[in-house]
Amino acid sequence: MRYSTELYGCYECGICVAACPSARFYDFSPRVFAQTMAREDVNSFYELLNDNVWDCSQCFSCTCCPRQNNPGGIITIMREVAVNNGLQSAKDALRAYSRIIYKVMTTGTQVSPDMLQPDFFPDWGPDVRDVSLNLDVWRRAIPPETLHTVELAWDVSEKTQLELYMIWKLTGNLEMIENVDEGLYMILEEVMEELLDEHGYDIDDFENILED
Amino acid sequence: MQSKNPIQLNVVNQNLKVKKAVDREFQLPKNPPTKDYRKELFALEAAGEIEIIRVPEPFVEVDTKYGRKKKIPIEHTWHHKSCGQCGHIPGYSTSIYWLNREFGLDYYDPRDQTSCTAWNYYASAASNPAAQAAIACRNFAQAKIDGYFPLIHCGTSYGHYKEVRAQLLHFPELREQVRKILDRLGLPFVFPEEIVHYSEWVHVMRHRIAEKQTRDFSKVTATVHPACHYHKLISEDAIYDRDLYDGQRTAIVTGVVEALGAKVADYSTFHDCCGFGFRHILVSRDFSRSFATIRKIERMKIEADPDVTITHDTGCVTTLDKSQFSTQAHNRKVGIPVISDAQFAALAMGAHPYLVCQLHWHGVDNVPLLELMGIDHEKAWKEFEEVADKLQQDPEAFLTWEDV
C-alpha cells in the first residue's frame, strides 16, 4: 500500500548515506536499498531481506533525499515482508526482543519500570540497580496518579486494553507473530482470549478484516 | 609566493556581487513543496468521511518549516503519554504536568490511552499500517469523547501519527479498513486538526515560563539535540523561527533554553540522530552506545563543553544519558547530564529536582549542573529520602500533587 509514496528514483548522490547513523557502524547503506528497489533487482532484494534490513535505525534521517525517497520507509515495508514470511532473519532479529512484543501487545505500553533490571541493562551503570532495588517506593514517590505502576509504564484501563486486543485481532497481528515466534503467539492468544471472554466476547468473532 | 601583479581572470565578472553565505538572507519557498494536510483533512470532513477535532482556544500560531502557521493549544489538552518517559524517566512527564498545574491550565491525564506502539513497529515490524492507524485513531476518538485535544508527549508518537495522517490522506482503502475497525469498537472516526508535540507547547509558553523563573540559569551552557522523528520524519509540521538559526534549523528546544537565559552552544553533529535505533537500544546496544557517545556526546564535549544537553524526546534522553556509563571504560570524553526541555523549564520555575523532576532516574551525575543552577541538591535529596521513608512505612501511600 505505501510503496508508491516511498520511492521516486535515485540520483546516487549518497546524501542518505551521509545522514545515516547505521551506515557509520554497520556494513549498511540506505542508498543500496533505494537502488535495489528502483532496479527491481529481486536477487539483491532477497539478500537484503535476509541480512542487514535489521541494521536500520528507523530514524528517517535519510528522508533528506533530494528525490523525496524514504529509504527508511522502504525498510519498514521490507521488515514486514520478512515477518509475514517467517524469514530466519526476522526470527534472529526478534529472538531477544519477544518480551518487549509481549509487553506492548498485552499491556498497551512498550516498556515498564520493572524492566530496569541490572541483568538486562548491565551497561547502564549502578543507577539501574538503585532503581530496581527501590522500585516500588520510587514509583509511589511520583506525583501523577497514573504513574504509580510497576508492570506498566502507566495505568491503562481494562476497557482500553480490551479495545487494543480487538485491534490486534482484527488486523491479523497475532498471525504475524505466529510466523516468527509460535510460543509467543500461543501466550498472547491465551492472555487476550481470557480478557475478551471475561467481557463476554468470543475471540473467534474478531476475524482478520484485512483478508476481506 | 604570491605575485605582486596577479593575472586578472576574465572568467569572473568583477561587477558581480556575490553575497557571502553569512550575509545571505533566508527566503522561504514561495510555494510549500508539500500539500497542506489541513485542507485535505477538512475536505475529508466535508465529504463526511471523518470528523476533525479542532484545536481549542486559546491557541498560539507559530511558523513551521515551509512557513505555514500551526496552532498550538495552551490548555484543554489530553496528555498522550510516552512509554519510555513514564516507564524509565518519569520526571519527564511529571514535569510537563507540573508546568501545566503551575499555570493553572486545564489538562487531562487519561487511563484510556495506549502507546502508539510505534517503538515496537519500528523495532520489529510486527504490525501493519491498518493496526497502527487504528491504534492512533482509537486514542484520538477517546480524546474526543473525553472532550480534550491530544498533546503528544513522545517524539516517535508525534512522528508516527504524522505518518499515519499522511497514509490516511493518501490511501482511501486504509481509511476504509480503519473505519471498519472503529465501527467494531463502537468509536467515531476522528483525527486532530494538528498533531502537536508537548515541546511545541513548551516553546510557545517559553516567555511565560521565563516570567515565572525563580532560578538563574545564566551560568549554564547547554547543547541541544532535536529528535529525528520531530524534524525529519514528515518535517513540515516542525516549528521554525526566523530569529533562531535564521530559520535554517528547527527552533524547538533552543527557543526555551535561550528564553530561560542559558547559553546555547553549537556543535558540528547537531543534525545527527542519537543512535536509539528502536530495536538497537533494547537488544543491540553496542551500536546505540557507540553512536550516542562518539558522534554526539563526545563531539559536544570537545566542541562546546556544555553543562547539560537538552532534548525533547524519550529515546534521545535515554540513549544519550544511559550510553555514557560504560563508555567511560574506553576513556571517551563523556560526562554530560541529559534532561528534557520540560525538566529544564520546571527547574527554572523552582520545581523540586527529585520530587518533581525525578533526576535520580537519570544516569549521568547531574550534581554539578544543579550547583550551577543554585540548587541545594543535598537538602533536596534528603527531602526525597524522607518522603521515600514515609512511603516505605505505608505500602498503600503515594506522593500527591499537594505534597509537592
Image (spheres, coloured by chain):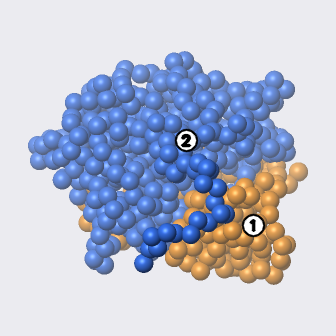
Chain colours: A orange, B blue
Looking at the picture, how far across and down is residue B166, in whole percent? 72, 44
Q: Is residue B56 above or below residue B380?
A: above
The image quarter containing residue B322 is bottom left
Please give the label number shown on residue A87.
Answer: none
Vertical side of A166 occupied by A22: above or below? below
Residue farthest to the top? B57
Q: Residue at x 28, y 59 (%)?
A: B305
Tell me the residue that label 2 is attached to. Answer: B25
Q: Nearer the viewer, residue A105 or B29?
A: B29
**Subunit that carries the residue with mark 1:** A
Q: Are marks 2 and 1 on the same chain?
A: no
Task: Tell me the residue that label 1 is attached to.
Answer: A11
| Residue B122 vs residue A33, the one in the foreground | A33
Nearer to us: label 2 or label 1 = 2
Q: For the residues marked 2 and 1, what is the alpha-carbon distance in whole angstroms?
A: 29 Å
Taking the image as drawn, is residue B148 in sight? no
Residue B176 visible from this viewpoint: yes
Horizontal and vertical percent position of residue B265:
34, 51
Side (left or right) of B153 relative to B100: right
Q: Amino acid at mark 1?
A: Tyr
Q: Nearer the viewer, residue B10 or B305?
A: B10
Quarter of the image where the N terminus of chain A is located:
bottom right
Please provide percent x and percent y for residue B377: 15, 46
Splitting the image into 4 quarters, where does residue B300 fall? bottom left
Q: Residue at x 45, y 40 (%)?
A: B244
Is B88 placed left or right of A62 in the picture? Answer: left
